[in-house]
Image (cartoon, grey):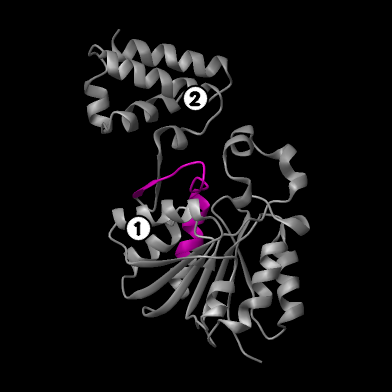
C-alpha cells in the first residue's frame, strides 16, 4: 500500500469516529520524523511493513480519542518542540500569550519562578528567551518534573526544578522573587460536562481541576505571595475565561493597594491576570 492510499483510508476512519481527519498528517510526519516537504514527496511511495504497523497503532489510539500530541509524544510551544506524556498537560496557544505578557513585565535579570511547571514549557521559554534570568520551576508531581527536566536538558536550559506544593518550597528556603508566573489548575469539577472527551479522558486531572469552583490554588498562592515577592516584582497568572472579575476582586480584598489587570487572549476571552507586587 502506498502512503497516499493509507492516508485516505485513515482520514475516513477518523471521520467515521468523529475525530479530526487532519491529525493523520501530523501522525505521519511526527512518527516518521518527516518534514512537510518529505511527507509530500513520499506520498506516492510504498509503505514499509514497519511504518505501516507503527502508523496503524497510532491511528488506533487517535480513533479512541487520544490527543495526537500524546500519541506522537511531543508538542510545540513558542516554536520549540517538547516531550509530552499523560503526566503533563498539552501546551495551549493561549499560554504563549501569558508568557509574552510576563516577558513584557519582568526585569532582564533576577530570580523568577514558574509554579506548576508541568512539562516545563513556561520555564524553558523564559530561560531561552531571557537567558540572564535565574529560573526556578516547581510542581507537585514528580512524574511531571521528570518530563520537565528532560525537556530542559534537551533545550540546554539551566533551570532549577523543585518538587513541592504551591509556594511552600520557596517559603521554606526564604527565596525572594523578582517575578512569578503560574498556569495552575483552575477548572471547576462541575464544568466536566462542557469539556472535550479527549481532554477529560486523557489529560491529568491533577493539572486541570481545583476545588472551590476552580479558585483554590489561586487563593492559596495569593495568601503566600507576601512571603516570596519583592516590591515591584511582576506576577502573572493564566486564568479561566470566566474567572477574571472574581479573581481580581478576591485579590483586591486581600491587597487593596495592588493595580490588578485582566487581559483577554486572541479569542477575546479573559486569560491573563497580572500586577506588580506592592508592599503596603
Q: For this view, does 73 lie left or right of residue 190?
A: left
Which residue is at a point 51% across and 41% down the rendered structure image?
Answer: 86
From the image, tell me which residue sits under label 1: 152
Q: Mark on residue 61?
A: 2
Tell me the crowding category of disc 1: few under 14, some 14 to 19, or many 20 or more residues within 10 angstroms, Cα based: many
**Quadrant containing the C terminus in the rendered view:** bottom right
Q: For this view, does 140 lie left or right of residue 133?
A: right
Q: CA distance from mark 1 to mark 2?
A: 28 Å
What segment is highlighted magenta in the picture?
A: 80-100
Q: Quadrant of residue 72?
A: top left
Instruction: Name which of mark 1 and mark 2 comes first in the sequence.
Output: 2
SS type, badge 1: helix
Q: Position of residue 183 (x, y in %)?
A: 56, 60
Q: Position of residue 90 (x, y in %)?
A: 50, 45
SS type, badge 2: helix
Q: Are marks 1 and 2 in contact (CB under 8 Å)?
A: no
User: In front here: 6 or 167?
Assistant: 167
In magenta segment, residue 101: no
Amino acid at each position: 500500500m502506498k502512503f497516499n492510499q493509507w492516508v485516505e483510508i485513515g482520514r475516513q476512519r477518523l471521520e467515521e469516529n468523529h475525530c479530526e481527519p487532519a491529525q493523520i498528517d501530523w501522525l505521519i510526519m511526527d512518527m516518521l520524523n518527516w518534514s512537510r516537504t518529505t511527507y509530500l514527496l513520499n506520498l506516492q511511495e510504498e509503505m514499509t511493513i514497519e511504518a505501516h504497523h507503527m502508523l496503524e497503532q497510532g491511528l488506533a489510539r487517535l480513533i479512541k480519542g487520544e490527543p495526537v500530541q500524546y500519541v506522537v509524544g511531543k508538542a510545540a510551544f513558542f516554536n520549540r518542540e517538547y516531550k509530552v506524556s499523560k503526566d503533563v498537560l498539552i501546551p495551549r496557544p493561549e499560554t504563549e500569550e501569558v508568557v509574552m505578557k510576563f516577558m513584557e513585565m519582568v526585569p532582564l535579570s533576577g530570580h523568577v519562578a514558574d509554579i506548576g511547571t508541568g512539562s516545563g514549557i513556561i520555564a524553558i521559554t523564559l530561560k531561552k528567551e531571557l537567558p540572564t534570568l535565574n529560573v526556578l520551576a516547581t510542581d507537585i508531581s514528580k512524574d511531571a518534573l521528570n518530563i520537565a527536566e528532560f525537556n530542559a536538558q534537551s533545550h540546554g536550559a539551566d533551570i532549577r526544578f523543585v518538587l513541592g506544593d504551591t509556594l511552600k518550597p520557596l517559603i521554606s528556603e526564604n527565596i525572594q522573587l523578582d517575578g512569578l508566573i503560574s498556569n495552575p489548575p483552575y477548572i471547576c469539577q462541575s464544568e466536566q460536562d462542557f469539556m472535550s472527551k479527549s481532554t477529560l479522558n486523557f489529560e491529568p486531572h491533577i493539572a486541570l481541576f481545583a476545588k472551590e469552583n476552580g479558585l483554590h490554588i489561586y487563593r492559596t498562592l495569593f495568601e503566600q505571595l507576601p512571603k516570596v515577592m519583592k516590591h515591584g516584582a511582576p506576577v502573572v497568572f493564566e486564568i479561566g475565561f470566566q474567572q477574571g472579575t472574581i479573581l481580581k476582586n478576591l485579590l483586591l480584598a486581600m491587597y487593596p493597594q495592588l493595580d490588578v489587570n485582566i487581559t483577554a487572549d486572541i479569542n477575546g476571552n479573559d486569560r491573563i491576570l497580572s500586577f506588580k507586587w506592592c508592599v503596603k
